[in-house]
Image (cartoon, rainbow, N blue to C red):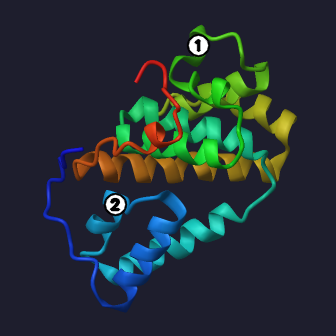
Amino acid sequence: MPSNLRIPKAPLDGLFGRALTLYARRTYGQVPDIAHVFLHHRRMTRAVLAFERRMAALSACDPHLKAYATMASSATIGCSWCLDFGYFTAHTEGLDTAKVRQVPVWRDSTVFTPLEREVMAYAEAMSVTPLEVTDEMVTSLHEQLGSAALMELTEMISLENLRSRTNAALGLTSQGFAESCDLAPLGS
């Protein structure tokens, strides 16, 4: 796929670059374009990867809810790279791909539970400017999920906002991850 990056790709050299390349190829089958962008600032890359690892290790909130929320956020912001990679990771983590592919059209879909629909509405409300989050949204999710899970969900949506806005600003577009697992997303 052609690259739409707004800055040139950084070389994946040195010990860190080579280790990142090996890990990415083994884990994802290819090196994500984001690696080439982030490696322009290696200390920042290490900080981001450490934060991502710690966030991925949290378990207060159902991983399916977090996946639906982050994909809904990506769709709202319009980051095709994040959606593409999100479908790939959802597939590799064993989520129901028939359901996952409907996240961008969740309002018209009948496959989601009421809680999943509330989570995606919350993710969308957090991903627009100005925010459209209401007291009622937070109260309902708090009652259903509890404090820790709501905080984790909120932070995951915030993290996806960071990812999506960074990737969209730097010109990252779909890299074909979803096609590698035969997952054809709807509405993207």
Q: Which residue is depicted at the point 47% across and 46% down?
A: 85
Q: Is residue 80 left or right of residue 118?
A: left
**What secondary structure is found at the residue carrying circle 1?**
helix
Mark closer to the observer (1, 2)? 2
Q: Is residue 65 above or below residue 158?
A: above
Give the residue displayed 30% in from the left and 90% down from the top.
14
Q: Quadrant of the C terminus?
A: top left
Residue at 52% across / 33% down in the picture? 182
For residue 159, above or below residue 58? above
Left/right of residue 63 with respect to residue 181 in the rendered view = right
Q: Upstream in the sequence, badge 1 or badge 2?
A: 2
In which image quadrant can residue 109 be found? top right
Query: In this view of the protein, which residue sits in the foreground, 161 or 94?
Result: 94
Marks 1,2: beta carbons within 8 A: no
Q: Position of residue 175 (x, y in %)?
A: 34, 46
Residue 83 shows in the view: no
Which kind of residue does numbered mark 1 sit on?
Answer: Arg
**Dot 1 surroundings within 10 Å: few (below 14), some, or many (20 or more)?**
few
Q: Quadrant of the N terminus?
A: top left
Residue at numbered disc 2: 34
Looking at numbered disc 2 in the image, what kind of residue is underneath it?
A: Ile
> Circle 1 is placed at which residue position?
107
